[in-house]
Image: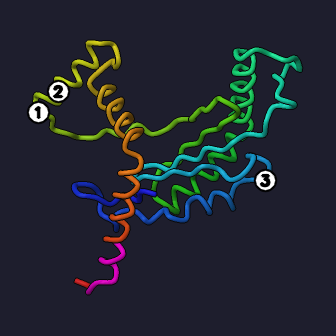
Amino acid sequence: MNTGRGRGGRQQGDVPPADDAAAWFSGRLPDGWFAGAPEVTCDRDEIVVVGELPALEDGRSDTGAEGDAADTAAAEAGRIARFREETREQRIRIARQAEARYRRKVAWGARLGGTRELFTTASVPVMTRLRQPERIVLDTLVDAGVARSRSDALSWSVRLVGQHADEWLAELRSAMERVDDLRARGPAS
């Protein structure tokens, strides 16, 4: 879990650790909202809570008839929309408590079958300076219709790297945690 450390960013003392956020949300959420513990991911700006909704009855759409893939997807999307509407006030109340505790915004989402939807996630601007070779890559993605803008192209690129570098990123995060532990045990300045 990334807690907001790193070169050029906020330092560890700027935001409280969110290492216990998954446990806090599991204990705080009303029973019956999700089938199992929610997936909780954190960075220095946001906590995203995504839960698996109880399955549609007998794998059928809400119309009660066996449906094709489009009917199933529509039923799943409808159930997620209903959950979003029915839980809005409680989710806001829980998010405010979590935001006070962790000093991060909270976003919600739900998953059902093959459908996953996030509700109002944060879009955080990131300042960067790119040299011409990197700008050309972004412009190529825009020109090819892969992205609408350089910003979208950069976001797309980051997602692609994340998908293909999960193991390496996990190892890097583990190493950063070991460094933080060593710093914490070192002499006070």
Q: Is residue 79 left or right of residue 101?
A: right
Badge count = 3
In the rendered image, the residue lying farthest to the left is 132
Foreground mark, 2 or 3? 2
| Image vertical order of residue 30 relative to residue 161, above or below | below
For disc 3, the marked residue is 31
Are discs 1 and 2 less than 8 Å apart at CB? yes
Q: Position of residue 111 (x, y in %)?
A: 66, 36
For label 2, the residue is 135
* Of callouts 3 and 1, the N-terminal one: 3
Q: Residue at image x 23%, y 24%?
A: 138
The residue type indicated by label 3 comes to: Asp
Query: Compared with residue 20, is residue 129 higher up or lower down, i.e. above or below?
Result: above
Q: Quadrant of residue 57?
A: top right
Q: Residue at x 62, y 62 (%)?
A: 24
Between residues 185 and 32, which one lies in front from this camera angle?
185
Magenta region, residue range:
180-187
Q: Where is residue 41? Give x, y as percent.
A: 51, 51
Q: Quadrant of residue 84?
A: top right
Name the residue beneath numbered marker 1: 131
Could you tell me the amino acid type at mark 2?
Answer: Arg
Is residue 62 highlighted in magenta?
Answer: no
| Coordinates of residue 106 in the picture (x, y in percent) | 53, 48
Q: Can you tell which quarter of the image residue 77 is in?
A: top right
Could you tell me residue 155's position as x and y percent?
A: 34, 32
